Image (cartoon, rainbow, N blue to C red):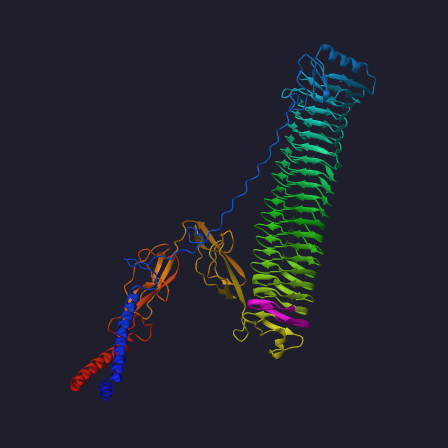
Amino acid sequence: MFVCFMGIERINDMKKRRLICVLLSVVLVLGVFGFASAQEAAEVNDAAMEIVGGAPVDAAGTREPEPPTAGTEKDSGGEEAEPSVPAEPLAQPSVQPAEPVPEAQMENGGPPALTGEAAPAEDGLQIMPLAAGDEAALRADILNAAPGGVVEISNSLQLTNTPLTIDKNLTFRSTGGTVQLSVAGAIRHINASAGVTLTFEGVELVGNAPAAGGGIEAAGDITLNGASVRDCQAAAGGGVNAAGAVTLSNSVLSGNRASAGNGGGVNSGLTVYVSGSTVSQNTAAAGNGGGIYSAGAFTLNSGTIDGNNAGLNGGGVYSPAPNAFISGGTISGNTAQGDGGGYYGLSIFVLNGTVSGNHAVESGGGIFVETVTIENGTVSGNTAGDNGGGIYTEQDFEINGGSVKNNAAADGGGVYVLGEALLNGGTVSENNAAADGGGIYARGKTQYAGVEINGNTAANNGGGLYAYSSVSVSNGSLTGNTAATGNGGGIYCGGNFMIQSGTVSGNEAGANGGGVYAVAPNAFLRGGTVAGNTARQDGGGFYGSVAYVMGSSVTGNHAAADGGGLFVVDVTVESGLIDGNAADGYGGGIYAENGIEINNGTVSGNTAANGGGISTIGDVDFNRGFITGNTAHEDGGGIYGTLASITAGSGAVFADNSAARGYLIKEADKALYAAKIFTAHITQPFTYAYNNFDINYVGIEIEYVVTFDPQGGSAVRPALVTAGSAVEKPADPVRAGYVFTGWFKDAAATQPWDFATAVNSNITLYAGWREGPAPAVVYTVTFDSRGGSAVAAAIDIPAGSTISAPADPTRGGYTFTGWFTDEAATRKWSFESDTVNGNITLYAGWKTAAGTAADTDAPKTGDTSGLWLYTWIAVAGASLFIVALVKIKRRRKKEY
């Protein structure tokens, strides 16, 4: 300021002095204006600390919500709502009116009741009035007819006192459709003498059941062609009782009853032939043959024998003669209180047709015979209280085709055979036995040459086949059978066993021998395949005494205990393949209690806890062949033999087997584990050459995957577990509306998993659930003080609830302005109204405290550092202006 003053004094020109004064005045004004502007800016910044974020604030300090974006609809949960689409109207089904039923139609198919006047009947039949002359005329016609003649009947009539007695061959024929002959008392319609053959065409004989009476009594042969006999009753042969042969062609016998003897519908002293006819709802109350009793050969060509009942045997048909034939038709829904629900006889050939849904209180639900041969057709859905749900044979059974399925009994759900079983073709499937032999129970020897035995179940032994004697398998397949608690999921063999070809696969045993259980010594596996079977104890593929493997493939079987492929006392392997089997205990490929001899063949890719390939406590003679690529979770990748001596010949290849532990860790832990080892080319002590036999070889650490199936709950990551180690229990999953009950080995949640159990294979564990209240949904609110003092998080906050404000944090040089949902501190959180709907973080807001320097490690808000410049300019300008005015006034005084 002094310099400016001195400068003005030295200027003589008055105009210049005035100009300088004006400039100084401008400077003064600018300084004052700048000071005012800086002060106003500081005040605005201070106010910004109180109103953070630029959103309007009401008097209570609450931020007003931003308006929603135009054009977006929100549902109650805040999600964008889908546009509603009107549902199309459902098409209404059209209903057709039912056709009227003719009044003349009757329940049993007969004409209207006689009224004494002529009346039209169905099929255009003219029913004539009943008069004494009608019956008398009929008796006269019979008397006057020549032998072999035809008696034509045009009117329905009722016999009143005595049956029609006939002593000649005659044919009774309706001339106007079906005509009825009914009886009034306990009499037969017809009594025919010996040697007489009678034929009925279009005539219906109606009895007066439940009283006795009606039907035909004949000492000769009877033929029904398009005729019917119903509701008749007699001591034997309720509908027809004939000493001769009976032929039923397109006829009906129904509702007839034999009160004391045999043959509810028909009782024939010779043969019975059925074609296109129906024999139904007949009863032999105390005898045999509810539908038909045929003392001679029986033939069913077509038609139906249905719903009949016998107090003894043969609910549908009883025929003690040999050579019965079923070439078509159906025997179904019949019942016997003894044996043979559908058919009881001596021998039968089933060429076609169906025997189904029959029941025997004792044995042979469908068929009970001495011998049976099935070429085609179906025996299904039959049941027996004792043995042989489908078929019971006292001697031999042969099946070349056709199907035996869905039958049930105590033993032999499908077939029970006391003699030999010849299984050449066809299928035996889905049968069930409450004890042994789900598909077939055979007491004699069994020749298995092509049949398929699939999907059968036995509660005890022999899911597919229970053979008391020997079994020879040369073709065919046994697959998917189950012995629920016993031995031999596919085959239980009480005698010697041999398989030359064919397949035994996918069977399961609750105890031993998932594929085959052979009790007797000398089992020969000459060919074929035993694959994919499972035993819950020993012998996944085969369980037996002495076995010879001579070309078979035993692959992919599993035992929960020992012997994944084979469990035997002694075994000789001449050729064949034992591959990919697994045991949870000892001997993935073979477990032998005494010894093993291998002259050729391959034992490869098998897995077990000990003895991945072979486990034995006897001697091992390994002369030639391959033991390769087997794995032990613990000891003996190739061979495990605690008391064995092992002789390895020059043709033996022992390679690429691995154990979980090695020779250098523990002497027992090696791929080839035995007390003694002898070879033709290597002598004791051990030398480097033994490495060729993988003695010291240890594979990489074996790891398995444990998969957790939440079964509708929240996802759980799978775990990778080292073999032999326990898997760590994961955090419990959650599921809305359910309570977690633990981890289980099965999807039905019946077998709990013990997390102390060692894992030695890839497994899946299943979450268990029970219905219950949904678990509470809670969240965590984290407080970020942004350079201020720490604030503890708020945890377990129920969804949709508000939270209490924590104590305000502190920070040197700053004043706390509240909590915000963003780091820029633009959206303030309201502890009174804002709710927690997820895990969130709230950020502290700050402004610089008055009279203090701001921290340098955080953004400055409300800063007034520019005020000093404007203040200096204003003061300097004002001073210069005042000095200049004083100097000017003094000079003017001097001048004047």
Q: Is residue 810 visible?
A: no
What stretch of residues is rendered in magenta? 627-656
Q: Is residue 347 magenta?
A: no
Q: Quadrant of the C terminus?
A: bottom left
Q: Is residue 629 magenta?
A: yes
Asked if residue 607 lies left or right of residue 253, the reply is left
Query: Percent x, y for residue 434?
Result: 59, 44
In the displayed structure, 246 sits above or below 821; it is: above
For image coordinates 37% across by 54% down, the residue present is 800
Query: Percent x, y for residue 744?
Result: 49, 55
Label the magenta part by its dominant secondary structure: strand
The one nearer the camera, 229 or 349, is 229
Asked if residue 786 lies left or right of residue 691, the reply is left
Outermost residue, top side: 132
The one nearer the camera, 856 or 13, is 13
Q: Quadrant of residue 791?
A: bottom left
